[in-house]
Amino acid sequence: MKSEHFVERHAGRSASQLESASTRKKVVNRLLEDDLIRRVSYDQYRQEIRQVYAGTRGAILAVCSLLSLHVPLGERLFRERRFDLRGRRNILDVGSGAGQLVQHVLKYADPEARITCFDLSHQMLLRARQRLRSTRPRFLAADLSRLPFPDASFDCVTCGYVLEHLPDARLGLAELSRVMMPGAPMLVLTTEDTFSGACTSRVWRCRTYNRRELAEACREVGLQWHKELWFSPIHKLLRAGGICVEMVKRG
Ligand SMILES: C[S@@+](CC[C@H](N)C(=O)[O-])C[C@H]1O[C@@H](n2cnc3c(N)ncnc32)[C@H](O)[C@@H]1O
């Protein structure tokens, strides 16, 4: 069905025409994308990002996530068990921000599960604490590229829109793979190299990822690209909402 639709839409266009249209699209997206992360050192970039989230953008992050429907649609992934938290005992939430994903983790994880939240920004940790009003999660400041946890500490990870703040996904994925137990699942949401992703990157000063390259990076660090997820059928049709994937730590 999908391939019929594709053939119909592109009837009369040769393979090389399609290829050059896709290259043009990539070039436009790349030109539009914020380039801070490519221009400065990672240390300088981190300082800039801390300021971005400490300021007004961090203060309105929770509202933005509601308006973009990321919070309600994200909840469906947990409620419908498309990302299943049942039986998980030690859950890590990466770059918790205002607690947008961890609020679902609190709701759908088993009552006895331990939940750890970390973020680069102290200000965001404070905001998450105030919003969640729960004493259950452990909050700590840390950088995804240097995690303060022993190997194989967590049997589940959630990582929403954080990888795009790294110059190379492998910096964070390798650390996450190290702290995950064999067989542990990880939900990853990240900005894609599409037109809407490039626009998002300008607001949050982040980069975007190419789906195929991210899958390759994931394999390189011992994670399996297990299952691609979509917020809704419309998101899938329009390839909107960024990359949403379940990765699993290889046994
Ligand atoms: C867009 S918010 C994501 C919030 C939430 N996880 C979600 O799903 O909406 C990105 C968060 O990642 C944090 N962050 C950025 N770079 C980070 C890093 N290297 N290590 C840890 N957290 C980081 C930011 O401070 C910010 O709070």
Image (spheres, rainbow, N blue to C red):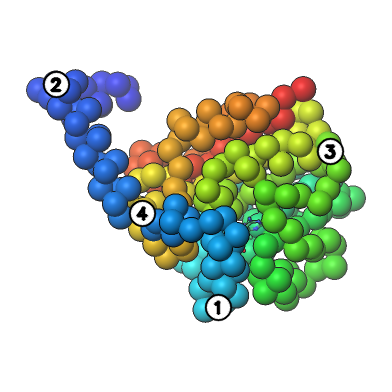
Q: Position of residue 172 (x, y in %)?
A: 64, 44
Name the quarter showing ligand 1: bottom right
Q: Where is residue 236 in the image (x, y as percent from the top left)?
A: 41, 39
Question: In the rendered image, which residue does mark 4 sit on?
Answer: 33
Q: Neighbour class for label 1 at 10 Å: few (<14), some, many (≥20)?
A: few
Query: Can the viewer see residue 79?
Result: no
Of circles 4 and 2, which is in front? 4
Q: Callout 1: helix, strand or loop?
A: loop
Q: Residue shown at 74%/58% (left/top)?
A: 142
Q: Residue shown at 29%/51% (left/top)?
A: 31
- Residue 192, by quadrant, is top left
Tag 1 or tag 3, which sits nearer the N-term?
1
Residue 151 image label = 3
- Residue 102, by quadrant, is bottom right
Residue 14 image label = 2
Tag 3 or tag 2, which sits nearer the N-term?
2
Question: In the rendered image, which residue does mark 1 sit on?
Answer: 55
Of circles 2 and 1, which is in front? 1
Q: Residue shown at 43%/38% (left/top)?
A: 210
Tell me if 103 is positioned left or right of 240 in this view: right
Question: Could you tell me the amino acid type at mark 2?
Answer: Ser
CA gap, disc 3 to disc 1?
34 Å
